[in-house]
C-alpha cells in the first residue's frame, strides 16, 4: 500500500512479472490497457457518485474526473465504431474510415501499420508505465497502446481479446441501462464532436489499428451472439446527462459501484437483475481470483480469460 | 493542533502568519537579533492568535461553508499596525493587528477598575496619563468582503498600487478596492453558458509585482494566461498564453490531471514566473510563451504510481511553491533562481539554478535534532535501494508538505507539515 512501512521484495516480484509481460504476443499489454482503462473508469465513477460530503465538493476535482470519464467514453465510442466497418464493407459513418481502409492492406501482411503517427510509437520503458490500481506497486503495465505496439506487431490472441472486449461492451450496455435516463443526448454528442485532447485521434487510430486483427477474425463470432452491439455508445453515451447538478445532487443508486476493485465482492445490487450485475462486477474486477462464471447472453471464452488473468497476476 | 492550510511571511519578514483548517490565524514574530549571540538569527515566537473565519451554512444549497483559511496575504506596513487579508472559500476579511503597550490612568469619573465614581465626590480634576502595561496584541476585523463568489476562492493577490486586490474562484476573478466592501468588479469569467460544457477551471491568480494592470491566472489544463486590465473591462481575452506542448512519450490517462497548475508565483523582479503542477516546477520567462525556461522534476518517481495516486486522491493535492528572498540586483543581472516546493513523506525540495543543484530535505522531529544541519534525503525509484535511501513504496503519502514560505530577505524558510510548522535557517558561520 502507499502507507508507511510495507516492505516488499521489490526486485524479485518485478522481475517475475516483467519477464512475462515482455512477451512477443503483445496480448497482455493490450488487455491490460483495456483493463486499466476500465479500472480508471470505475474509479472515476465511484469518485463522482459516492462522494457525499457535508461541504460542496471541489469543482476542480469534479471537472477533472468528468474530463477523464468523457475521454474514456470517447475512446470507447471510437473503438466501438470499428466493428461496423468489417461487417458491412459499405461506407461507415466514422470519419476515421479513410485511414482505416489504408490500414487494411498493411495489416494483411501482419506488419506494423505505417499509418501510425511516429510520435505514438514511443520508447516508453516499462518501468514508467501506469500502475493498475489493484496492482498498486506493479509498474509493468503500459499506459498507451503505443508502447505495446512498440513491442512488435504481433497479433493478440484474437478470441481472448474479442471475448474481453465483448464483456466490456456488454458491461457498458448494462451500465447504460442502469444509469438514469439520459436527458440531453445533444450535449454529449456536442462534447464528443468537440473532442478533448490532442492525442485523441492518435489514440483512436492506434486503438482501431489494434482492433483490426481481432476484428477480422472475430467478425463471424461477433455476428452471431451480438447483432445489436456493434456500436457501443452509439448515439447515447452513459454520460449524456452527466451534468454537475446530477453529480452533486442526483439520488442515484450507487450500490453497483460500491466495490473495491481489489476484491470481487459485490455490493448489494438491489435494483438490478441480480445475476447479471454480479457477473458484471466479476468481469470488471480486474484481478478476480475466482473463476468467472457468466450468465451473460454472449459466450465468453473462459479459459482464455483465465489465462490472461494468470499472466497478469503472475500466479 | 489543527491542519495548517497556508503560510506567509510579511514584507519585512519579521512576522510569519499561518492559517489553519479551523479558521484560526496564528502570527509568529521574529525576536530582535541578539547582539551577543550573533551566530543565530532571531527565533520566531507566537505573537498573536485569533479566529478569522467561522463555519457557516448555506441554506440555499444545504451545504456547509468551511472556515478553513485558504490564503493569507500581508499588506505592506504603512503605520504602527499590521494589516493582512485572510480568506476562506467565500469571504475575504481585512484584519488589523495592533499592539497596545500603554494605557491611560487617572480618569476623573471612573475608578481604576472601571466603576463609575459618584460625581458628588469629585472635588479636583486631573489629566489622565499613559502608563506602560504588558504588551497586548489585538486583532480586529476592519473590512469584510463577502457575497462576491459563487465558487470556492482559491487565491487572493494584492496589487502593487496597494489599493486594490483580486480574488479568484474556480470560474471568476474579481477586483476589489480595499476600502470598499459592497462592490467588486468582475474581471475574468470563464463560466460557460451551459455548465455541462465546463472542462477547465481557474486554479490560481496573482498580480504582477510591479505592473498594476497586469495579472496572471492558471488553469486546470496547465495553461497560464496573462491579462492586462487596460485592454478591456472584462479580461476574458488574454494578452499572453503560456503553455508547453505535451511530451507525447509521457502521455497517459492522467496527463491532464497532472498538468493542472496548483500554484503560480511571480519572481520578485516580475520578469519570471513559476508554476507548480503535480510532478514538476516550471520557470517561465514572461517574454516566451511557448515553453518554460526551466523545468525541475519534484518527484518523477511518482509517474508510475499515478493510478494509485488517482485512486486515493493524492493526485489532486495542491502543492505550492516559492521563490527565495529577493536580492534584486543579483536577479536582474543573471537568471538567478532558487525555488522551493513540497512533496510527500514530509520531504521538501529546493532547486538552485546557479549551481545546478537540487536537494531533498525532510521536516520531521524524529529524524532531525534541533539545531543540526538537515541531512539530504534520496528516494530510490526502482532497483536496488542503497543505504539511507527510501524506496517509493515506503513513502508516507499522508505526510505531505503543501505550504512553504521563504523569508523575503534572509535565508529563513517556513515549512508546514500537516500539523506542525518548521522554521529552518541556513547555517551562519
Image (cartoon, rainbow, N blue to C red):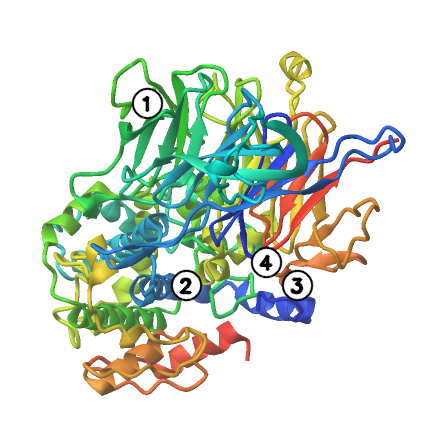
Q: Chain of mark 2?
A: A
Task: Report whether residue A315 is seen.
Answer: yes
B142 sits left or right of B12 in the view:
left
Mark in front: 4 vs 1: 4
Q: Secondary structure at mark 4?
A: loop
Mark in front: 3 vs 2: 3
**How much space separates mark 4 and mark 3, taking CA atoms?**
26 Å
Mark in front: 2 vs 1: 1
What residue is pinned by disc 2? A36
Residue A17: x and y in percent read 58, 69
Q: Return the residue nearer the eye: B104 or A89.
A: B104
Which quadrant holds residue A210?
bottom left
On residue B238, the disc is: 1
**How much space separates mark 2 and mark 4, taking CA atoms?**
40 Å
Are the residues at dot 2 and dot 1 in contact (C-beta closer than 8 Å)?
no
Query: For the point 67% across and 19% down, which residue is it?
Result: B327
Q: Secondary structure at mark 3?
A: helix
Q: Return the residue nearer the eye: A10 or B391.
A: B391
Q: Secondary structure at mark 2?
A: helix
**How much space separates mark 1 and mark 3, taking CA atoms?**
44 Å
**How much space separates mark 2 and mark 1, taking CA atoms?**
38 Å
**How much space separates mark 3 and mark 2, taking CA atoms?**
24 Å
Asked if marks 3 and 2 fall on the same chain, the answer is no
A195 sits left or right of B298 in the view:
left
Which quadrant holds residue A267?
bottom left
Q: Chain of mark 3?
A: B
What residue is pinned by disc 4? B1
Residue B287: x and y in percent read 47, 16
Are the residues at dot 1 and dot 3 in contact (C-beta closer than 8 Å)?
no
Q: Chain of mark 4?
A: B
Asked if marks 1 and 3 fall on the same chain, the answer is yes
What residue is pinned by disc 3? B394
Amino acid at each position: 500500500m502507499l502507507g508507511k512501512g510495507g516492505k516488499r521484495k521489490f526486485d524479485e516480484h518485478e522481475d517475475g512479472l516483467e519477464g512475462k509481460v515482455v512477451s512477443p504476443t503483445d496480448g497482455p499489454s493490450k488487455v491490460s490497457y483495456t483493463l486499466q482503462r476500465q479500472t480508471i473508469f470505475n474509479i472515476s465513477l465511484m469518485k463522482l457518485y459516492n462522494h457525499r460530503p457535508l461541504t460542496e465538493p471541489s469543482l476542480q476535482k469534479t471537472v477533472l474526473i468528468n474530463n477523464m470519464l468523457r475521454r474514456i467514453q470517447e475512446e470507447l465510442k471510437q473503438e466501438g465504431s470499428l466493428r461496423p466497418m468489417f461487417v458491412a464493407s459499405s461506407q461507415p459513418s466514422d470519419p476515421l474510415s479513410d485511414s482505416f481502409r489504408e490500414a487494411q492492406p498493411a495489416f494483411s501482411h501482419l506488419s506494423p501499420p505505417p499509418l501510425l503517427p511516429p510520435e505514438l510509437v514511443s520508447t516508453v520503458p516499462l518501468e514508467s508505465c501506469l500502475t493498475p490500481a489493484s496492482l498498486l506497486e506493479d509498474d509493468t503495465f503500459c499506459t498507451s497502446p503505443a508502447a505495446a505496439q512498440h513491442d512488435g506487431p504481433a497479433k493478440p490472441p484474437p478470441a481472448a481479446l474479442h471475448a474481453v472486449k465483448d464483456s466490456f461492451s456488454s458491461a457498458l450496455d448494462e451500465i447504460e441501462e442502469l444509469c438514469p435516463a439520459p436527458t440531453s443526448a445533444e450535449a454529449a454528442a456536442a462534447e464528443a464532436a468537440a473532442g478533448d485532447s490532442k492525442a485523441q485521434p492518435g489514440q483512436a487510430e492506434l486503438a482501431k489499428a489494434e482492433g483490426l486483427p481481432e476484428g477480422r477474425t472475430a467478425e463471424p463470432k461477433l455476428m452471431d451472439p451480438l447483432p445489436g452491439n456493434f456500436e457501443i455508445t452509439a448515439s447515447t453515451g452513459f454520460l449524456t446527462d452527466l451534468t454537475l447538478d446530477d453529480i452533486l445532487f442526483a439520488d442515484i443508486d450507487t450500490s453497483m459501484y460500491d466495490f473495491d476493485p481489489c476484491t470481487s465482492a459485490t455490493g448489494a445490487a438491489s435494483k438490478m437483475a441480480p445475476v447479471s450485475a454480479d457477473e458484471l462486477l466479476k468481469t470488471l474486477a480486474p484481478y478476480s481470483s475466482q473463476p468467472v462464471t457468466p450468465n451473460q447472453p454472449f459466450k465468453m471464452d473462459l479459459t482464455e480469460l483465465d489465462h490472461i488473468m494468470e499472466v497478469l497476476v503472475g500466479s | 493542533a489543527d491542519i495548517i492550510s497556508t503560510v506567509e511571511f510579511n514584507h519585512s519578514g519579521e512576522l510569519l502568519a499561518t492559517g489553519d483548517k479551523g479558521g484560526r490565524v496564528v502570527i509568529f514574530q521574529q525576536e530582535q537579533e541578539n547582539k551577543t549571540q550573533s551566530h543565530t538569527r532571531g527565533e520566531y515566537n507566537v505573537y498573536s492568535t485569533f479566529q478569522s473565519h467561522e463555519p457557516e451554512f448555506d441554506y440555499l444549497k444545504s451545504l456547509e461553508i468551511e472556515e478553513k483559511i485558504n490564503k493569507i496575504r500581508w499588506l505592506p506596513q504603512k503605520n504602527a499596525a499590521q494589516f493582512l487579508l485572510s480568506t476562506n472559500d467565500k469571504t475575504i476579511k481585512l484584519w488589523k493587528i495592533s499592539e497596545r503597550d500603554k494605557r491611560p490612568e487617572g480618569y476623573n469619573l471612573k475608578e481604576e477598575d472601571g466603576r463609575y465614581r459618584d460625581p458628588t465626590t469629585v472635588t479636583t480634576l486631573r489629566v489622565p496619563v499613559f502608563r506602560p502595561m504588558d504588551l497586548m496584541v489585538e486583532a480586529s476585523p476592519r473590512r469584510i468582503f463577502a457575497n462576491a463568489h459563487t465558487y470556492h476562492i482559491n487565491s487572493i493577490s494584492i496589487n502593487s498600487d496597494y489599493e486594490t486586490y483580486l480574488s479568484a474562484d474556480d470560474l471568476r476573478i474579481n477586483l476589489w478596492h480595499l476600502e470598499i466592501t459592497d462592490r467588486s468588479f468582475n474581471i475574468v469569467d470563464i463560466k460557460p453558458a451551459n455548465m455541462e460544457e465546463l472542462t477547465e477551471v481557474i486554479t490560481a491568480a496573482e498580480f504582477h509585482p510591479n505592473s498594476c494592470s497586469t495579472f496572471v491566472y492558471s488553469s486546470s489544463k496547465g495553461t497560464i494566461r496573462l491579462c492586462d486590465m487596460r485592454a478591456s473591462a472584462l479580461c476574458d481575452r488574454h494578452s499572453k498564453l503560456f503553455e508547453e506542448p505535451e511530451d507525447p512519450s509521457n502521455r497517459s490517462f492522467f496527463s491532464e490531471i497532472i498538468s493542472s497548475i496548483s500554484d503560480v508565483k511571480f519572481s520578485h523582479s516580475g520578469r519570471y514566473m513559476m508554476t507548480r503542477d503535480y510532478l514538476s516546477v516550471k520557470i517561465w520567462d514572461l517574454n516566451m510563451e511557448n515553453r518554460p525556461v526551466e523545468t525541475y522534476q519534484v518527484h518523477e518517481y511518482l509517474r508510475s504510481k499515478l493510478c494509485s495516486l488517482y485512486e486515493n486522491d493524492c493526485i489532486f493535492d495542491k502543492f505550492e511553491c516559492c521563490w527565495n528572498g529577493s536580492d534584486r540586483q543579483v536577479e536582474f543581472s543573471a537568471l538567478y533562481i532558487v525555488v522551493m516546493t513540497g512533496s510527500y513523506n514530509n520531504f521538501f525540495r529546493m532547486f538552485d539554478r546557479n549551481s545546478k543543484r537540487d536537494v531533498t530535505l525532510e521536516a520531521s522531529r524524529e529524524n532531525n535534532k534541533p539545531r543540526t544541519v538537515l541531512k539530504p534525503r534520496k528516494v530510490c525509484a526502482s532497483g536496488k535501494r542503497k543505504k539511507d535511501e527510501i524506496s517509493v513504496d515506503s513513502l508516507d503519502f499522508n505526510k505531505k508538505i503543501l505550504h512553504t514560505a521563504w523569508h523575503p530577505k534572509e535565508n529563513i524558510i517556513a515549512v508546514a507539515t500537516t500539523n506542525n510548522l518548521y522554521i529552518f535557517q541556513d547555517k551562519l558561520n
